[in-house]
Amino acid sequence: MLQPIGDRVIVKVKDEEEKTVGGIVLASNAKKKPTEGEVVAVGEGAYASNGEKIPMSVKKGDVVLYDRYSGTNVEYEGEKYLVLHEKDILAIAK
């Protein structure tokens, strides 16, 4: 498994629906880029300028919302992941 470094988080991207509520099948270029996923790995955290470690506020298993254009897409062992900085996570879904 991938292990992020610093304040990075690896998120398993949630697949977008391929049909609308009315049952219309969407073309691949009509689908919106996903903005939700499950955290599968968390880095050790960032360090403040005084050397103090800043703990991460997300943990493995959290479902998070993130900005549509943030992070780096990665494919690993056939699965799609997104590597984000913790600051790019907008919310944790409860």
Image (tube, rainbow, N blue to C red):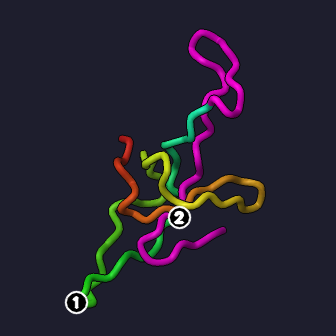
Which amino acid type is shown beneath numbered disc 2?
A: Ala
Q: Does the magenta stretch include residue 53?
A: no
Is the stretch drawn in magenta largely helix, strand or loop? loop
Residue 79 lies left or right of residue 52; in this view the side is right
Mark 1: amino acid:
Asn
Residue at the image point whose x is 43% and y is 48% from the top: 67
Q: Is residue 83 toward the left or the right of residue 51 in the image?
A: right
Label 1 CA crowd tier, 10 Å (few <14, some 14–19, many 20+): few
Discs 1, 2 touching: Cβ within 8 Å: no
Q: Work out which residue is located at the far bottom of the displayed protein and give it.
A: 51
Taking depth in this image into account, of 89 and 32 the one nearest to the observer is 32
Q: Residue 4 carries which label?
A: none
In the image: residue 39, left or right of residue 54? right
Q: Nearer the viewer, residue 18 or 60?
A: 18
Q: Nearer the viewer, mark 1 or mark 2?
A: 1
Q: Residue at x 48, y 46 (%)?
A: 68
| Above/below status of 62 relative to 17 | below
- What residue do we see at 66% from left, 14% from top? 24
The N terminus lies in quadrant: bottom right
Residue 89, compared with residue 53, is above or below; it is above
The local secondary structure at tag 1 comes to loop
Q: Where is residue 3 in the image (x, y as percent from the top left)?
A: 58, 73
Tell me which numbered mark, 1 or 2, is placed earlier along the sequence.
2
Instruction: Give the extent of the magenta segment.
Output: 1-30
The quarter of the picture where residue 86 lies is bottom left
Quick one: quadrant of the C terminus?
top left
Left or right: 67 as drawn, with respect to 48: right
Q: In which quarter of the image is residue 7?
A: bottom left
Q: Using the image, tell me which numbered label, if any, was put on residue 41.
A: 2
- Kindly identify which numbered label has been placed on residue 50: 1
